[in-house]
Image (cartoon, rainbow, N blue to C red):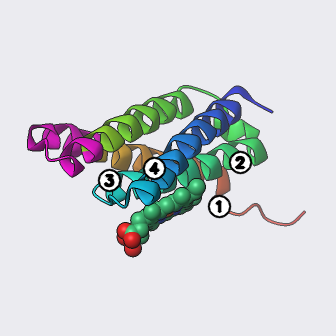
Amino acid sequence: MNAMSRLFLLTAVLAGCAGMAMGLVMGILHDFSLTAAHAHLNLVGWATMCLVGLFYAVHPRAAEGVLPRVHYGLAAVGMVLMAGGLIGVGSGAMALEPVLVVGAILTLLAMLLFAVIAFRALWPVPAPA
Ligand code: HEM
């Protein structure tokens, strides 16, 4: 398995552990103010990064070069800032809203870059021999 795939999968596993632990604490305390942070840590962190890691494992040539590294940087920093911003805003610290916005923009940029990487790897469909 290539390095990009490992990096995305290991980051996804860490985000999943943090997101699920957050959900368990929310349930125990009956305090759902961090529901948005929990949902995004699980869906952007765990689910999305896990799918991307599997994509790079199936398409190792797409994991070569500088673009996938930039993709990982945008996705990882975006996810951390977005989750941190959502935790802050969910806790009433509205001063952290810009952190959330920057995290969300980086997360979208990561997805757009991944669209370029995925289309370069998958399109056009090769003609049958
Ligand atoms: C140990 C695992 C998990 C626990 C204990 C847990 C717990 C919770 C709790 C307590 C809520 C708030 C429910 C409410 O507001 O009434 C919630 C909401 C949510 N969770 Fe989880 N969760 C877990 C895993 C996951 C995973 C793996 C995902 C996604 C991949 C996820 C996605 C969501 C979403 C999207 C919401 C918001 C639902 C809504 O507002 O309608 N959760 N979770």
**Is 1 contained in the magenta span?**
no
Residue type at mark 4: give it. Val
What predominant SS class does the magenta segment belong to? helix
In the image, what residue type sits under mark 1?
Answer: Pro
Q: Which quarter shows the C terminus?
A: bottom right
In the rendered structure, which disc, 4 or 2, sits on the residue that comes first in sequence? 4
Amino acid type, label 3: Leu
Image location of residue 76, percent across then percent down: 45, 34
Q: At 15% from the left edge and 43% from the top edge, which residue is drawn?
A: 97
- The stretch of residues the image draws in magenta is 86-103
Q: Which one is nearer the viewer's eye here, 128 or 83?
A: 83
- Circle nearer the N terminus (2, 1): 2
Give the Cα separation between the discs numbered 3 and 4. Answer: 10 Å
Nearer to us of marks 3 and 4 is: 4
Residue topped by disc 1: 124
Quadrant in the rendering for residue 109: top left
Relative to the observer, which residue lies in front, 125 or 57? Answer: 57
> Distance of mark 1 from mark 4, alpha carbons?
47 Å
Q: Which residue is mark 3?
A: 34
Tag 1 secondary structure: loop
Q: Earlier in the sequence, mark 1 or mark 4?
A: 4
- Camera-nearest residue between 42 and 105: 42
Using a 10 Å C-alpha cutoff, classify the residue at mark 3 as few (fewer than 14 neighbours), some (14 to 19) or many (20 or more): some
